[in-house]
Image (spheres, rainbow, N blue to C red):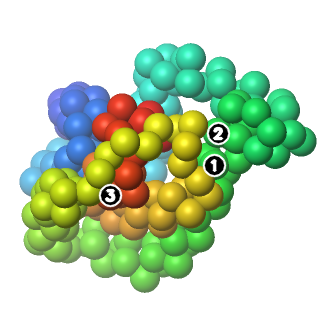
Amino acid sequence: MDILKAIIMGLIQGIAEFLPISSSGHLVLADHYLRNMGKTSLWFDVLLHIATLIVVITFFFSEFMTLIRGGIKFYRFFGDKESRLFWLIVIATASTVIVALILEPFLREAVEENYKLVGILLIVNSFILILPYLLHTSQNKTLENIGPLESIFVGIAQGIGVLPGISRSGITISTGLIAGLDRASAGVF
């Protein structure tokens, strides 16, 4: 892969990952349009996401430490704030993994090879982002008063976010808003 393409792809990942616009969808499109610079490897994609993970852990360090403390106290189940949030994240993550494992084998390869479908999914993503505002849902729950059902709902939506063109953060936040979370809590969750 050409060094210029690596820089372009890194910039796209760095900018798009923190916006609800599907970094993976934009990377698929960039890879398609920059195909004369070489094909990106799986290793390169992994490195992009590791860099993103480092930034996310740094930015959300306080919340990350809350999850670590909750994980250490997992045996309390829903007994305190930290273990409760830990278990809600475990429930959401399990839901995400189940949906992603079901969808991924059927759709991932077909979508990545069909950049026009990725464009359509980017348009679908825009509708997902405005859906909470069209539904006029009440958004007054915080992380302290959401339950396992909301966690499952958000996890299922995030599983759908494996599709290039559907933003994982965008669909997660939109679903959190639909489930009644306030904006800050939906963003953190």
User: Disc 1 marks which residue?
Assistant: 88
Looking at the image, tell me whether mark 3 or mark 2 is earlier in sequence order: 2
**Residue at image point 86% right, 40% down:** 76
Location of residue 20 with respect to 57 vertically, above or below: below
184 lies left or right of 155: left
Query: How far, Cα to Cα, is label 3 from label 1?
Result: 17 Å
- Name the amino acid type tagged 3: Ile
Q: Position of residue 93 (x, y in %)?
A: 59, 54
Q: Which residue is mark 2?
A: 85
- 31 or 107: nearer the eye? 107
Residues under labels 2 and 1: Cα distance? Answer: 5 Å
Mark 1, other Cα within 10 Å: few <14 / some 14–19 / many ≥20: many
Residue 47 in the image: above or below residue 22? above
Q: Amino acid at mark 1?
A: Leu
Q: Secondary structure at mark 1?
A: helix
Count of labels in the image: 3
Residue 150, which numbered label? none
On residue 178, the disc is: 3
